[in-house]
Image (spheres, helix red, strand yellow):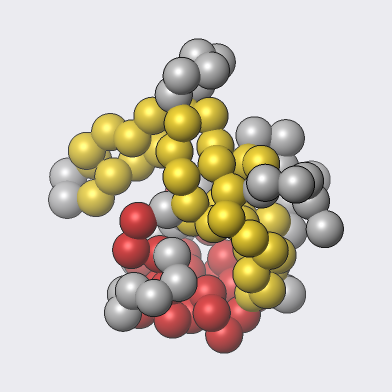
Amino acid sequence: MISDRLFVYGTLMRGFDHPMAQLLSRSADFLGIATCRGRLYLIKHYPGLVLSDDAGDIVFGELYRLRDRDALLADVARRAGVTGASRACAIVPTEFAHPPGGFP
């Protein structure tokens, strides 16, 4: 089962004018600042997150609860021109994304 929680970083975070950040602000509830154990790698023109077991590999971002997960992921996939929503955005399992103080 795919979680309804989404970890984002970079220009997808609040305060950025990226179209996907705007879509997220309309379609999800902000849960808080979060970290994810992983590393960022340059993939063409954007950073891609790869999960890591190394406790020193930390990516800072935000955690959201998607209101209508399937509809939002389909919209993201359509906008990105990707077949299969799982390829359009990285869903980070909630056991890897940790907001300070735990989950609400």
Residue at image position (56%, 69%) is: 74
Numbered circles on residues, count: 0
10 in relation to 14, above or below? above
Q: Is residue 31 left or right of residue 104?
A: left
Give the quarter of the figure containing the C terminus.
bottom right
Q: Is residue 39 left or right of residue 55?
A: left
User: 38 or 102: which is nearer to us?
Assistant: 102
Q: Is residue 104 left or right of residue 22?
A: right
Q: Where's residue 1, x and y in %? A: 79, 45
Q: Where's residue 57, x and y in %? A: 44, 24
Determine if residue 88 is in view.
yes
Residue at image position (50%, 14%) is: 54
Q: Where's residue 90, x and y in %? A: 50, 47
89 in relation to 31, above or below? above
Q: Residue furthest bottom?
A: 26
Q: Residue furthest front?
A: 101
Q: Residue furthest left?
A: 45
Residue at image position (73%, 59%) is: 4
87 in relation to 59, above or below? below
User: 33 or 2: which is nearer to us?
Assistant: 33
